[in-house]
Image: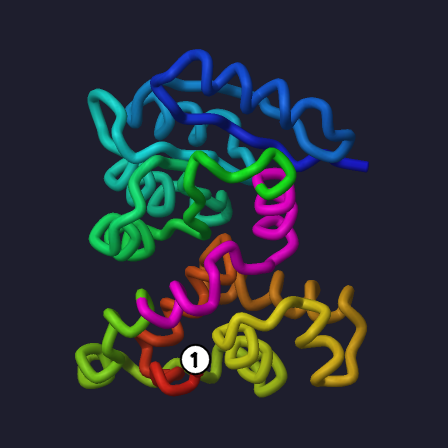
Amino acid sequence: MSKITVIIADDHELFRKGTRDLINKEKDIQVIGEVVDGKEAIELVAKLQPNIVLMDIAMPVINGIEATRKIKTNQPSTAVIILTAYDNDQYIVALLEAGAAGYLLKNVSGDELINAIRSVYGGEAVLHPAIAHKVFSHFSPAEHEKSQIDDRAEVSEREMEIIKLAAKGMSNQDIADSLFLSRRTVQAHLGNIFRKMDVGSRTEAVLQAIRKGWLKVDDLA
């Protein structure tokens, strides 16, 4: 079984070590690299192409927001999970705009962090639905509908159903139950959606669907 590969980007050595030791205890996840600033993160992701990057915001040389933006431009299939001490809306919105897949505070438990890595890798969301609704409301589709060509044909009707349910914060299992599908089938559909939309996570797919005008903010309720 192939492991979920992770790079840790944080300028605090003790935090990196503790996080690495925690992750490497898991049989299905492996830390394959560590960096201390955003520039190194961009370079190492390009070289190793991990599944997941755990990214802090406040780092030297290039901060986590800009590093996330460049990683998502160069390596869209790599998902970035923000792991930080900062929890204000300005940072959350900026990082979702940059392409982050999830946002966690450093006071999360070890189990929560491990579950978040597995969840993002499996196409699940790592944003509380209430936070997601508040943040996604920032991206008014009306601003983008006039300039966006209707390219909804790139996804199938079934995939569009799944995007809409994912936007509501439903888990893969809940989506499967709602559509009378298996969880594995939902994961396969999400993989196809991510590939077609050139993204690496559910959060990015929902945000892009809002920007394209496929979803209204009311659809997230």
Residue 60 or residue 185, whichever sits in front: 60
Q: Main secondary structure of the magenta part?
A: helix
95 over 109 or under it: above or below: below
Q: Residue at x 78, y 84 (%)?
A: 180
Q: Measuring from the top left, give residue 189's x and y in whole percent.
A: 65, 70
Circle 1: element type: helix
Q: Residue at x 78, y 30 (%)?
A: 27
Q: Is residue 15 left or right of residue 218?
A: right
How many discs mark residues in the rendered view? 1
For residue 131: magenta? yes
How many C-alpha atoms fall within 10 Å of the one at disc 1: few (<14), some, or many (≥20)?
many
Q: In which quarter of the image is the N terminus?
A: top right
For residue 54: magenta? no
Q: Measuring from the top left, give residue 58's x and y in whole percent.
A: 26, 30
Q: Measuring from the top left, give residue 153's x and y in whole percent.
A: 47, 84
Q: In which quarter of the image is the C terminus?
A: bottom left
Q: In this view, does 61 lie to the left or right of 52?
A: left
The boundaries of the magenta stretch are: 113-134
Q: Is residue 39 left or right of residue 29?
A: left
Residue assigned mark 1:
220
43 over 155 or under it: above or below: above
Q: How is the image coloured?
A: rainbow
Q: Residue at x 51, y 54 (%)?
A: 126
